[in-house]
Image (tube, rainbow, N blue to C red):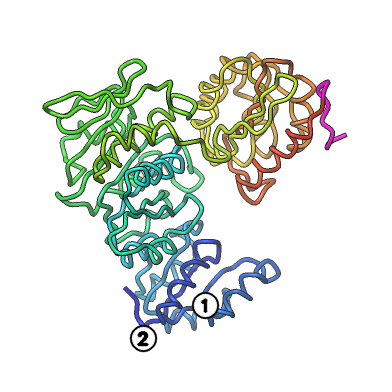
Amino acid sequence: MYGAHDSVIIIGVGRSGMATAKVLRERGVGVVAYDDAPSERLGMQREELAALGVPLVGPQELPSAVRAATGAVVSPGVPLTHPAVRAVQAAGVAVISEIELAYTIARGPLIAVTGSKGKSTTTALIGHLLTEAGLTNRVGGNIGNPLVIEAAAAPHGAWIVAEVSSFQLESIRTFAPRISVLLNITEDHLDRYPSMEEYAEAKYRIFANQSRGDVFIGNADDAYCALLRTGKTRRVPCPAAWFGTNASDRGLRLVRLGDILVVRDRRREVPLVSVSDLRLRGTHNVANAMAAALAALHAGAPLEAVRRGLTTFAPLPHRLATVHVADGVTWIDDSKATNPAATVAALEAVDGPVILIAGGRSKKTDFRPLGHAAARRAKRVILIGEAARDIGLHIDGPPVQYARDLEEAVSAAAAAAVAGDAVLLSPGCASFDMFESAEQRGERFAVLARSTGAGGRNVAAS
C-alpha cells in the first residue's frame, strides 16, 4: 500500500503503533509517530522508534508532520474524533487502521473474528483447529500480537486468523476477510459509542467489503446478529453460515442438540462432538467452539481434525482459568471479562457457590444484568475500583463488600471462602483505573490467590 516515496503518520504508539512503525520501516516507508502522552511516559517508545529511524512528535510538531504526510495509520485506542485524527483528515490525508494495513500486505486469506465477548478464545481455537488439520496459519490482532506483524511474517498462502475489535473496524477501507465471524453484540464500549446501534454498526463492518466468494458466520441466538437474518435489506453481501440453537437456515450450519453439536447441511446431519468433551467452561464457550468449528470447516479443515481439535483446546489465560486450588477453594481468573455480559456468562459457567470479585473502570454499560446474575449465583460479592458503588446499587441479595484494592478483595474472599467455594475474579469492567491491562490484573490476582494460606488468611496481604 505504501512505498519508499510515502511519509506515514502513526497516531498512537502503543503495541499496535510500534508494530506498524517496524513493518513500514522494513519496507522502506518514511514514518513519523505521534502521541500526546507526557514525554516522560514515552521514553522507551522514543528509543525504539529512534532505532528504526522514526521521529516521535507531539502536538506542537504535528502540523508540520501533517503537511508532509501521504498517509496515516491510527491505533485502535485512539478514537476517530481525536484532534490529531481530525487534523490529518482535514489535510486530506487518508486514515486507516492497523488491520487495514495488515490486509494490504497479507499474502494469504484472512479469517476475522469480532464480538463483544469470546473473541480471543474463538480466534485462538480457530488457529488450533487449522493446525490440527495441517493448514499453515498465523494468529494475531487484538488477541495480543499485532496483526500487521503476523501478516508480514506469514508465508504465501497461509491462513491469517485475526481478532478484530470495533475500534479497529472503524477505519477499514478495503479489509475483506475470506471468512468473517460475528460472535455476539452485547453492551460494551458505550463510553466510546453514543448508542448500542452505533456500536453494532461498527461490528457489522467486519463483512462490509466481503463478496460472493466469501462467507459470513453468525450467531443465530444473538439478537443483533439475528437482525442480519430478518431485515428487509440484505446486509450481508456473501453466503452466511449460522451456529446456535436457532440455526435453521439453508447451507452449512452448526446446531446444539442437548449435549451434542451437530453439523448440518442440505443433505446430511453429522454429530461433531459432545459438549461434555470440551475443555472450555460455560454455554458462551460452547458458542465460541461452534463458531470456530464452522470457520475451520469453511477453511477446508476435515471434520475429524475439527473434532479432535475441539477436545484438545485448553482455555486461554485470564478467561475462566483456574489459577489455584487450596483447602477445597478454587480460584478462577476471568480478568478478561471487561463488560457485564462477560461476567454474567462467567457466573453461569462456574459450578457451586461463588464469591465474586468485580469492578474497575466503567464503560458506561448497564450493570443491572450483572446484579441480577450475582443475585442468582453469588454467595458474596466483593467490589473494587471506580465503578464499585455503581455496581453495588444493582446487587440485591448476596452480601456486598467494598475493598480498596485487589489485595484487600482477595484477603476478604479468602476469609469468607469455605471448602467447595469458587472465588471468581470477573470484573465486568476495564482495568485502567488500577492496572495497565486486564492481563496485569489477572496476573496479580493469581499471585495473591496462590499466597492464600490455610484458614482463609492471605499471606501476601497480612
The residues colored magenta run 454-462
Magenta segment includes 429 = no
User: Quarter of the image holding residue 441?
Assistant: top right
Q: In which quarter of the image is the N terminus?
A: bottom left
Q: Does the magenta stretch include residue 460?
A: yes
Q: Which residue is drawn at 38% across and 36% down?
A: 309
Tag nearer the camera, 1 or 2: 2
* Residue 106 placement: quadrant: bottom left
Q: Which of 236 and 331 is in front in this view?
A: 331
Q: Position of residue 30 (x, y in %)?
A: 44, 82
The main secondary structure of the magenta stretch is: loop
Mark 1 / mark 2, whichever is N-terminal:
2
Residue 413, relative to residue 166: is it above or below? above
> How many numbered discs?
2
SS for callout 2: loop
- How many residues crowd around disc 2 within 10 Å: few (fewer than 14), some, or many (20 or more)? few
Image quadrant where one finds the C terminus: top right
Q: Which mark is residue 5?
A: 2
**Could you give the CA–CA distance between mark 1 and mark 2, rounded to whole angstroms?**
20 Å
Write the residue at 73% across / 37% down: 406
Q: Residue 287 sits in which quadrant? A: top left
Amino acid residing under circle 1: Leu
Residue 457 lies left or right of residue 151; in this view the side is right
Q: Which amino acid does label 2 sit on?
A: His
Query: 342 or 242, which is in the foreground?
Result: 242
In the rendering, at what x and y percent does residue 340 appear?
53, 32
Which mark is on residue 403? none
Residue that label 1 marks: 62
Q: What element carries label 1?
A: helix
Residue drawn at (54%, 79%), measured in percent from left and top?
52
